[in-house]
Amino acid sequence: MTDNRELEALVRRQLQASWTRRGFLGRAGLAAGMLAVGPGVLAACGSDDDSEGGGDGETERTESDTLRISNWPLYIDAETIPAFQDETGLTVEYTEDVNDNEEYFAKIREPLSRGQDIGADLFIVTDFLVARLIELGWLAEYDSANVPNKANLVDSLAHVDYDPERKYSLPWFSGFTAMAYNIDLTGEEITTTEALFDPKYRGKVTMFSDMRDALGMVILMDKGSLDDLTEADIQAAADRVAAAKDEGQIRRFTGNDYGDDLVAGNVAVCQAYSGDVAQLQLDNPNLRFVLPETGGLLFSDNMVMPTTTENIVGAEKWMDFVYDPANNARLTAEVQFIPPVQQTGEELEKIDPELAANPLINPPESEMAKAFVFPTLTEEEEVTYTDIYTQVTAS
Amino acid sequence: MRGTATGGAKRSRSAPYLLGLPALAYLGIFFVIPLVTLLKMSLSTNVGSVYEPTMVLDWHWANYSDAFSSYGAQFSRSFLYAGIATVLALLLGYPLAYVIAFRAGRYKNLLLGLVILPFFVTFLVRTLAWKTILSDTGWVVSLFDLLHVPMPDGRLLSTSWAVVFGLTYNFLPFMVLPIYVSLEKIELSLVDAAKDLYSAPWRAFRAVVLPLSLPGVFAGTLLTFIPAAGDFINAQYLGSAQNAMIGTVIQKQFIVVKDYPAAAALSFVLMAMILVGVLVYARVLGTEELT
């Protein structure tokens, strides 16, 4: 495996020497050529595979002129990357190829399990996937000493159960998974999760197809908390959704694509992510977001580096850069999710006081009290629960 | 002299096989090998974690019986939707291909171009465009309302009809092009001969044009039905929560649940059902006449 990596590094250096925009095709061609010889090379050096695996050992201090970042669509502003490139002299290759945690996992699983490059030095995924990747030993540990701005991380996210010291991950943004509605169609403010099941909105409701995002709120409505979650809770919530589906209450199960139907006026009430609604309101000012009385979910998307990262040094510089309060405020003003950096609120005040007062970006205590974190599941729980809900969404 | 001659003969005999070699190698590597892997997986049990699966081939035939018993409804739904879409595409596509082949004159190429034009836009975007067209607040629904056309649940989008229309639209060119090709080849003097023998236009069509165009109809229906039966994009974006097709199930089993053996078994069952259907269909239409 080491031979292969050296070979790749050699080729990459060669390519970077003549790296221009126009040189891209040549580079792609060479990469394809390498892919073609890949299996042979891999087979030849596949024996010491095991010694590589795991993030429990020392992470190799890789460094390169390029930093390859994979992120979700519409999850960055226009200035962060140029500013970072100017400051560090690195070239950022930014790809918006994370559309769904499980789909992204399906894509990286095979190469990461063999210690092969996944085309990203740093990527951004949600809590539960970070927990799984740490468990699998596929994430690289970074050196906190090189990320002094890590100290700006808000206390509530500094010690999460899957990464108590934040050795592998740093939050990118947090947000609420709750509900959005079209006041023009509902004719009234929505305040409870029951609205999803209200016959008034029959055929005008969408729910998430993701087990956590869909069932979390329903369980909170029935049980008031997500502590001591059992299979019976999941089953009860799934049954409830299944019954609503059979009655024609639920129009569709959606992923990130719920926005189209909401903006078009096909949907009156739906499950939604907080930051999206701010952007969707530009297309339809009648849209509102609400954390229902019984509560919604609080999630975080996190920056992580795979064990195959080729630029851990650059990734640390990137994390430090976006954790600078001024930089973070600029980013937050565009993305409109909840920033994980303590001083962002003050900086945001300087850019746009109205945004700083927005409870979805800078949520007050009363709102935070209604936001629950979905507990980390064991593999067995995850499989069982997911299967239960998939029976509902795919039938 | 003699030696050279036989050498030449040998070479010409083996040449067609050699020419076929790249395609065979391609299919071998990218179709046969994955297919065998898939077959093996469909009969295996995952003894490892779902994230790092360790497949053991233990001839677990229950994967197949489970596929039938758990997802019978989605299979029949898929074949129903694909079947209706194929019939609709044929009803729309045949007359269109006929007009292009025999009546379009100098507009022939333009019309053919228009048939292919939607392919310049990706499948997903074309499907999403239908969401806008069929939207509850769109003009189609308003028009239907005005004309008192009954709609299930008072809407078009997120219904089984939207899925069927989407499938019909997305696969229509696959119906039109093969039929056009087979119609275009027809010697018009045969039709003239039929007319000379006092055949009515309809009879000339039935006795001459239709049988000669059957190879195109055969190819077109297969090219429409097979991908439509396995499709999951149309059901996902145009359908409702109750319209999941078997493609949706396979995708979910693979990506979300990560039950790879079940997903593989489902894929094989789908493939086998389509294969049997195609064989029966070929028998009925009579492959002998098609060549």
Image (cartoon, coloured by chain):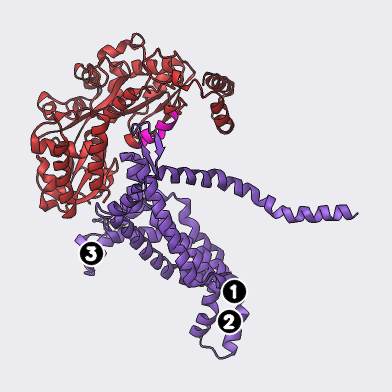
Chain colours: A red, B purple
Q: Nearer the viewer, residue A100 or B278?
A: B278
The image position of residue A140, as x and y in percent, is 38, 18
Q: How far apart are marks 1 and 2 (CA)?
A: 9 Å
| Residue at mark 2 shares a chain with residue at mark 3 | yes
Q: Residue extending furthest bottom?
A: B198
> Counting other residues with Cα less than 10 Å from the Cα at mark 1, is it few (<14), some (14-19), or many (20 or more)?
some
Classify residue A226 as left or right of residue B97: left
Disc 3 element: loop
Q: Which residue carries the number 3 mark?
A: B151
Q: Residue extending furthest front?
A: B58
In magenta stretch: residue A109: yes
Which amino acid is tagged 2?
Answer: Val
Q: Which of B131 and A254 is in front in this view?
A: A254
**Image quadrant occupied by the N terminus of chain B:** bottom right
In magenta stretch: residue A260: no
Q: Give the range drawn in magenta.
A: A103-111
Quarter location, residue B154 = bottom left
Q: Residue B186 carries which label?
A: 1
- Looking at marks 2 and 3 on the same chain, the residue that comes earlier in the sequence is marked by 3
Classify residue B26 as left or right of residue A340: right
Q: Which mark is residue B191?
A: 2
- Looking at marks 3 and 1 on the same chain, the residue that comes earlier in the sequence is marked by 3
> Counting other residues with Cα less than 10 Å from the Cα at mark 3, is it few (<14), some (14-19), or many (20 or more)?
some
The image position of residue B62, as x and y in percent, is 33, 48
Q: Residue at x 22, y 67 (%)?
A: B150
Which amino acid is tagged 3?
Answer: Met
